[in-house]
Image: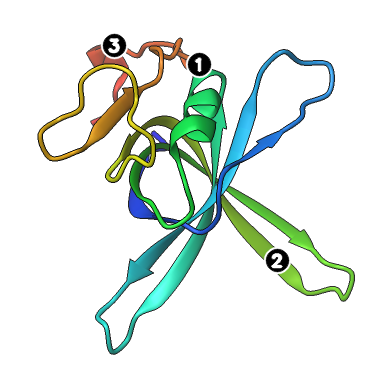
Amino acid sequence: MNSITLTGRFGKDPELKPLKDSTKKLCVVSIAENQGSKEHAKTQWYTAQFWGDSAERMMQWAKKGMAATLFGRLKVDEWEDNTGAKRTNLIINVDQFQLAQPAVQPHGDVAANGTVVVPEAPLQSQTPIVSDDEIPF
């Protein structure tokens, strides 16, 4: 099962990407995760992709510098650039997200701590359901 939970800060304002021959909406934003102690800190950058209604919500609420927790699936995109150097982009296809500091007050209730949870519509299973008898352990 491919699953990732990431907490970090957005490195830029979200951007709506046009898709050819599609009515779906795609919102892309970079998010940074700090790893290690202050003395030995390393920042890992990811590209977060939000689809459909989540894309619209991100465009309304998210801003550069805002803290968020993302729940989704990780994809590694590898290629060679013009100089022949190997490049890697870590992409999170976001299923659900939680904004820790809403930039715009959304319609409806917000938790006492200011947290807004925006669940995506339930995903249709892309893999068949496996019974306990089929699990090899």
**For numbered disc 3, what is the local secondary structure?**
loop
* Amino acid type of the residue that numbered disc 3 sits on in the rendered structure: Ser
Residue found at x 46% / y 10%: 124
> On the picture, is 59 further left or further right than 39?
right
Q: Nearer the viewer, residue 115 or 8?
A: 115
* Amino acid type of the residue that numbered disc 1 sits on in the rendered structure: Gln
Q: Which residue is mark 1?
A: 126
| Residue 78 in view here | yes
Residue found at x 27% / y 44%: 100
Query: Which image quadrant for residue 42?
Result: bottom left
Q: CA distance from mark 1 to mark 2?
A: 29 Å
Q: Residue furthest bottom?
A: 39
Q: Residue furthest left?
A: 112
* Amino acid type of the residue that numbered disc 2 sits on in the rendered structure: Arg
Which mark is nearer the camera, 3 or 1?
A: 1
> On the picture, is 111 further left or further right than 133?
left
Which label is found at residue 87?
2
Nearest to N terminus: mark 3 or mark 1 = 1
Badge 3 vs badge 2, beta-carbon distance below 8 Å: no
Q: Quadrant of the N terminus?
A: top left
Q: CA distance from mark 3 to mark 1?
A: 16 Å
